[in-house]
């Protein structure tokens, strides 16, 4: 399946091997990090953080992740301009994931673009239909 079909298509193709790939490719110890719009509650993006990424996020006041595929620090928006201004960091009960509460400072948070050519607000722009096999775009998210 091409990247275009994966990101823009309606066929369900979940990557259940993602964590295995992270373990095989990533040289760092990481935990999941979720970025949530502090005003709307919308989940924008899910990534991973290591100690450096979390320390950088706190210092720079911007959502920062560790790219598990490139094995490098990733300050969201540094190249695209779609920064996520960090308002608060929450830690879950087992201390194995973090929640970045953010204010989007650009056009969107997703690396994909909508029909208007602008970055989508978040990465969760499709929903699973009741048939459990196909996706549909959320209203206004195509």
Image: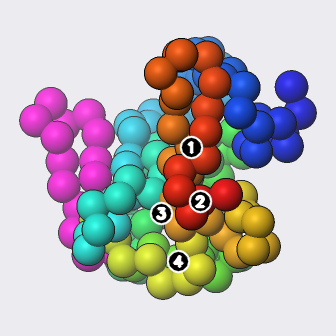
- The image quadrant that residue 26 belongs to is top right
Which of the image's four quarters has the N terminus?
top right
Secondary element type, mark 3: strand
Sequence-earlier tag: 1 or 4: 4
- The image quadrant that residue 35 belongs to is bottom left
Colouring rule applied to residues: rainbow
Residue plotted at (73% across, 43% down): 7
Residue plotted at (10% across, 35% down): 93
Image height of 29 relative to 60, above or below: above
Q: Between residue 65 and residue 133, name the one nearer to us.
A: 133
Mark nearer the viewer, 3 or 4:
4
x then y, percent, for residue 16: 58, 16
**In screen coordinates, is 11 left or right of 86?**
right
x then y, percent, for residue 97: 29, 39
Image height of 10 relative to 53, above or below: above
The residue labelled by disc 3 is 64
Q: How many numbered discs?
A: 4
């Amino acid at each position: 399946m091409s990247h275009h079909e994966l990101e823009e298509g309606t066929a369900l193709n979940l990557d259940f091997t993602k964590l295995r790939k992270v373990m095989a490719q990533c040289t760092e110890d990481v935990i999941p990090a979720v970025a949530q719009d502090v005003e709307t509650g919308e989940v924008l993006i899910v990534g991973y953080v290591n100690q450096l990424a979390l320390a950088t996020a706190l210092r720079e006041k911007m959502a920062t992740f560790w790219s598990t595929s490139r094995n490098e620090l990733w300050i969201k928006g540094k190249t695209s301009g779609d920064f996520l201004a960090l308002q608060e960091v929450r830690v879950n009960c087992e201390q194995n994931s973090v929640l970045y509460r953010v204010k989007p400072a650009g056009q969107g948070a997703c690396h994909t673009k909508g029909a208007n050519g602008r970055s989508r607000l978040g990465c969760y722009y499709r929903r699973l239909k009741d048939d459990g096999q196909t996706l549909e775009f959320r209203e206004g998210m195509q």
